[in-house]
Image (cartoon, helix red, strand yellow):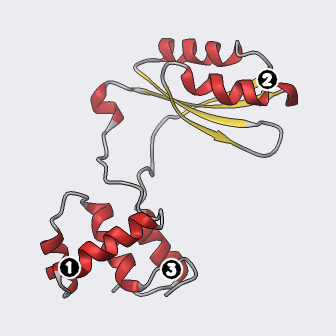
């Protein structure tokens, strides 16, 4: 077991689920050479530990018409942090909000249908009470997204695949 309570079999299960969260337990069991009950119990434990937060799908934003990806760095006055935490996530087309260190307190990802609507979201961010400065970065091309974190964890930690 690692410091996170994961052994190589847990990582293998997570890796399979990360590729296809709809795969039946029986198929995972066959792939890993264990019983279906083992898979069920381990998945349940991974959920209880909060390591496995849910089962989801990946959607291509471009196929939904979100053709404009913009990252916005937002600087906020110290007395307005709570307000910004509440208000920025409510803005149309805001897909992600990360609290950061350094001169900017937030990194915001906007997924909008076009540059005009992205600009409206940027204007709405700038209008949030307490926002002092913003810096926008338009994404020209996505090179890596939806990285399989379990596979990368295995690679980065030097652990072998089960």
**Residue 10 picture quarter:** bottom left
Name the residue rendered at 36%, 54% in the picture: 54
Which residue does the numbered mark 1 point to in the structure image?
Answer: 37
Image quarter where the C terminus lies is bottom left
Name the residue rendered at 39%, 26% in the picture: 67
Q: Nearer the viewer, residue 16 or 44?
A: 44
Residue 152, percent from left and from top? 46, 69
Helix, strand or loop at label 2? It is strand
Which residue does the numbered mark 2 point to in the structure image?
Answer: 133
**Residue 120 picture quarter:** top right
Q: CA distance from mark 3 to mark 2?
A: 42 Å
Q: Mark 3 or mark 2, which is nearer to you?
A: 3
**Residue 14 picture quarter:** bottom left
* Marks 3 and 1 in Cβ contact (< 8 Å): no
Mark 3 or 1, nearer chain start:
3
Which residue does the numbered mark 3 point to in the structure image?
Answer: 5
Name the residue rendered at 28%, 69% in the picture: 16
Residue 133 sits above or below residue 46 on the image: above
Q: CA distance from mark 3 to mark 1?
A: 19 Å
Helix, strand or loop at label 3? It is loop
In the displayed structure image, the side of residue 134 where residue 108 appears, left or right? left
In the displayed structure image, the side of residue 65 where residue 35 appears, left or right? left
* 10 Å crowding of disc 3: few (<14), some (14-19), many (20+): few
* Marks 3 and 2 in Cβ contact (< 8 Å): no
Mark 3 or 2, nearer chain start:
3
Q: CA distance from mark 2 to mark 1?
A: 54 Å
Helix, strand or loop at label 1? It is helix
């Amino acid at each position: 077991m690692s410091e996170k309570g994961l052994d190589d079999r847990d990582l293998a299960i997570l890796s399979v689920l990360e590729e296809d969260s709809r795969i039946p337990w029986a198929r995972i069991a066959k792939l890993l050479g264990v019983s279906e009950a083992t898979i069920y119990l381990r998945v349940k434990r991974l959920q209880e530990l909060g390591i496995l937060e849910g089962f989801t799908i990946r959607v291509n934003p471009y196929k939904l018409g979100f053709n404009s990806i913009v990252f916005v760095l937002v600087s906020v006055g110290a007395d307005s942090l709570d307000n910004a935490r509440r208000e920025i996530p409510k803005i149309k087309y805001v897909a992600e909000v990360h609290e950061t260190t350094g001169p900017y307190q937030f990194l915001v990802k906007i997924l909008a249908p076009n540059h005009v609507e992205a600009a409206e979201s940027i204007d709405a961010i700038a209008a949030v009470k307490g926002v002092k400065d913003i810096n926008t970065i338009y994404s020209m091309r996505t090179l890596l997204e939806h990285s399989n974190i379990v596979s990368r964890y295995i690679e980065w930690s030097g652990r072998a695949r089960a």
